[in-house]
């Protein structure tokens, strides 16, 4: 049993560290995932704290992983990891059973798990955490008390610093479908002959007396003679179209640029020859204006060099007022907010394209000069 406990400790510790580091690499992305969970559970009052909770959870996860790996303070950390895995097992089960959140965000954009895969992963982790918890008193620390304390403090400080670095700049390692070097046009294409979504039509009939509802496929309906023989008891209620088999979905499937007239201009932007600079503000009311003068200066230089600049936002009604407020000498087009949050983890953020390929991107804290961009 001793060997299994030691193996479990190493396995759980490493997995916690990897999971925590991946989320700490993109704390904003994890905060968006937390907001999804808050919406599902009706905890909207937690949404303003999503980013703070994202940082706290990732730091906690990394520190717990390191503590378990080196056998530090096991009486405390065994309890913490057990309570944590029980909580997340409940969340992933609820999400899977009711199909509320399609991706748990456990490993950020590095590895997408279906709801049931996430739940299975938590069950496996629970199996390995239980022996650690039950034999916690027999696990000896690898280091003395002072070194132990130093490791815990250092891992806490470094984890927090890494989170803040990625918030104030951009993820160190980009796992998103819009990363540098990606050709957006190719990532949006659907190959010829690729399978398409398959739907099934369902007819819903309601019992007038009891209120009971029953669903029938068109084939089943033709056999359910009692529905039309006794029309006084049953009546048609609604018709549903249910997805029964998902077809091919490109890596980028929700990115579209619309002009003020409602026309889709995605192709004209992405397939344009030469360079295009995108200024992305997913939400104008939440956008940082601190570095707007630097952005405006860069835009003026781009204009002299003949490089088109366009803004993308989901804040349709605020576009013109915002442009005048910050003296933005470039037009704003409309794009889905979730897509823009995924393109660049900054509000505003800058993305340089060359015929649809992402050449580079910058956080608003790192606005380049024109010579640096050139």
Image (cartoon, grey):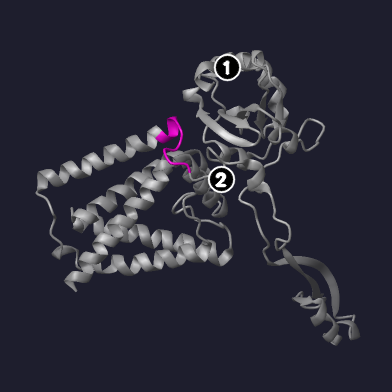
Viewport quadrant of the C terminus: top right
Q: Residue at x 54, y 24 (%)?
A: 288
Which of disc 2 and disc 1 is earlier in sequence?
Answer: 2
Instruction: Name the residue carrying label 2.
Output: 177
225 in magenta? no
185 on left or right of 264: left
User: Magenta region: which residues?
Assistant: 166-174
x, y percent for residue 165: 39, 32
Q: Is residue 76 visible?
A: yes
What residue appears at the point 39 percent right and 41 percent down from the top-left corner? 55
Looking at the picture, how far across and down is residue 208, in whole percent? 83, 76
- Quadrant in which the N terminus is drawn: bottom left
- The answer to whether residue 103 is above or below residue 340 is below
Residue that badge 1 annotates: 298
- Which of 160/185 is in front? 185
Question: What crowding class fits label 1: few (fewer than 14 Cα within 10 Å), some (14-19), or many (20 or more)?
Answer: some
The residue drawn where x is 58% and y is 59% is 100
> In the rendered picture of this protein, how many numbered marks are placed on residues?
2
Task: Give the image location of residue 268, x and y in percent.
Answer: 75, 34
Secondary structure under tag 1 reads: helix
Q: Is residue 275 above or below residue 102?
A: above
Viewer-proximal residue, 332 or 324? 332
Could you tell me if the residues under marks 1 and 2 are in contact, i.e. CB atoms within 8 Å? no
Is residue 154 positioned above or below 365 on the image?
A: below
129 relative to 328, above or below: below
Q: Which mark is residue 44?
A: none
């Amino acid at each position: 049993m001793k060997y299994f406990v030691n193996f479990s400790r190493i396995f759980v510790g490493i997995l916690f560290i990897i999971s925590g580091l991946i989320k700490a690499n993109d704390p904003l992305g994890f905060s968006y995932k937390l907001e999804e969970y808050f919406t599902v559970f009706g905890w909207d009052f937690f949404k303003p704290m999503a980013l703070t909770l994202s940082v706290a959870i990732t730091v906690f996860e990394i520190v717990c992983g390191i503590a378990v790996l080196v056998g530090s303070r096991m009486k405390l950390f065994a309890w913490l990891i057990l309570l944590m895995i029980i909580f997340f097992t409940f969340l992933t089960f609820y999400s899977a059973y009711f199909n509320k959140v399609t991706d748990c965000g456990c490993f950020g954009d590095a590895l997408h798990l279906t709801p049931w895969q996430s739940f299975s992963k938590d069950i496996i982790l629970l199996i390995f955490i239980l022996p650690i918890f039950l034999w916690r008193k027999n696990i000896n620390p690898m280091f003395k008390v002072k070194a132990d304390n130093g490791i815990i403090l250092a891992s806490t400080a470094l984890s927090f610093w890494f989170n803040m670095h990625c918030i104030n700049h951009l993820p160190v390692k980009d796992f998103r479908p819009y990363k540098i070097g990606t050709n957006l046009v190719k990532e949006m294409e659907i190959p010829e002959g690729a399978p398409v979504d398959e739907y099934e039509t369902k007819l819903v009939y309601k019992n007038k007396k009891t209120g009971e509802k029953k669903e029938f496929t068109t084939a089943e309906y033709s056999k359910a003679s009692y529905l039309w023989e006794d029309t006084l008891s049953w009546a048609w209620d609604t018709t549903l179209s249910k997805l029964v088999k998902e077809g091919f979905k490109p890596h980028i499937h929700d990115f579209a640029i619309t002009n003020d007239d409602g026309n889709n201009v995605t192709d004209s932007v992405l397939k344009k020859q030469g360079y295009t600079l995108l200024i992305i503000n997913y939400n104008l009311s939440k956008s940082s204006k601190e570095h707007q003068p630097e952005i405006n200066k860069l835009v003026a230089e781009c204009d002299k060099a003949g490089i088109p600049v366009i803004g993308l936002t989901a804040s349709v009604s605020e576009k013109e007022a915002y442009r005048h407020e910050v003296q933005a000498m470039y037009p704003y087009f409309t794009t889905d907010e979730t897509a823009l949050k995924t393109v660049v983890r900054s509000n505003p953020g800058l993305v340089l394209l060359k015929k649809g390929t992402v050449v580079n991107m910058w956080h608003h804290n790192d606005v380049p000069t024109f010579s640096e961009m050139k």
